[in-house]
Amino acid sequence: MNTKEDIRPVTYLKSRAADLLEQINTTHRPVIITQNGEARGVLQDPESYDNMRTAIGLLKLVAQGEEDVRSGRLINQNALFDRIETRLKQKKSHPQRSSKFHRVWPFNFHRPILTWEGKETTFPDAPGSII
């Protein structure tokens, strides 16, 4: 972080927004926006933001896995592969009928969306999102 370039007052953002956007998209470093001398926000380029979100998601998965190990929720590797093979054989012998309906659980959305030939609808009584 370059303190001189990466910390800017909100007045600078108001008057030079295009310059700040060019800076963050060129350097891929976030800019901290201050108001009355205190940090009040962060301006970040979309690519870095997406990378950060991906990293956080992976860290959450690692933390869940570690919790599973601590809690004893483990399965033997051979037993896991046997279970997968059994399910695959069942699917091959009993293929599901295709449907025009597909349920989608969007990120940070509290109701599922049912899509049908490109049209979407929500269900008011559906459970919360998986995230």
Image (cartoon, helix red, strand yellow):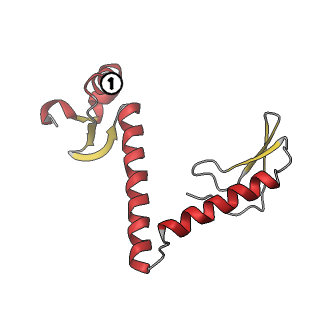
25 or 67: nearer the viewer = 67
63 or 73: nearer the viewer = 73
Q: Position of residue 38 (x, y in %)?
A: 23, 48
Residue 128 against residue 29 in the figure, above or below:
below
Residue located 55% across and 65% down the image: 80
Location of residue 64 (image quadrant): bottom left
How would you rate the neighbour count of disc 1 (Cα within 10 Å): few for under 14, some for 14-19, many for 20 or more? Answer: some
69 or 131: nearer the viewer = 69
59 or 120: nearer the viewer = 59
Residue located 41% across and 59% down the image: 60
Residue 12 against residue 85 in the figure, above or below:
above
Q: Residue beneath label 1, please?
A: 25
Residue located 28% across and 31% down the image: 11
Q: Position of residue 105 (x, y in %)?
A: 66, 51
- Left or right? Give the position of 37 relative to 111: left
Q: Position of residue 101 (x, y in %)?
A: 82, 44
- Left or right? Give the position of 26 relative to 82: left
Residue 96 visible in the current orientation: yes
Say which amino acid is labelled 1: Asn
Q: Quadrant of the N terminus?
A: top left
Location of residue 53 (image quadrant): top left
Residue 15 against residue 31 in the figure, above or below:
above
Q: Position of residue 16 (x, y in %)?
A: 30, 22
Residue located 41% across and 32% down the image: 46
Q: Quadrant of the C terminus?
A: bottom right
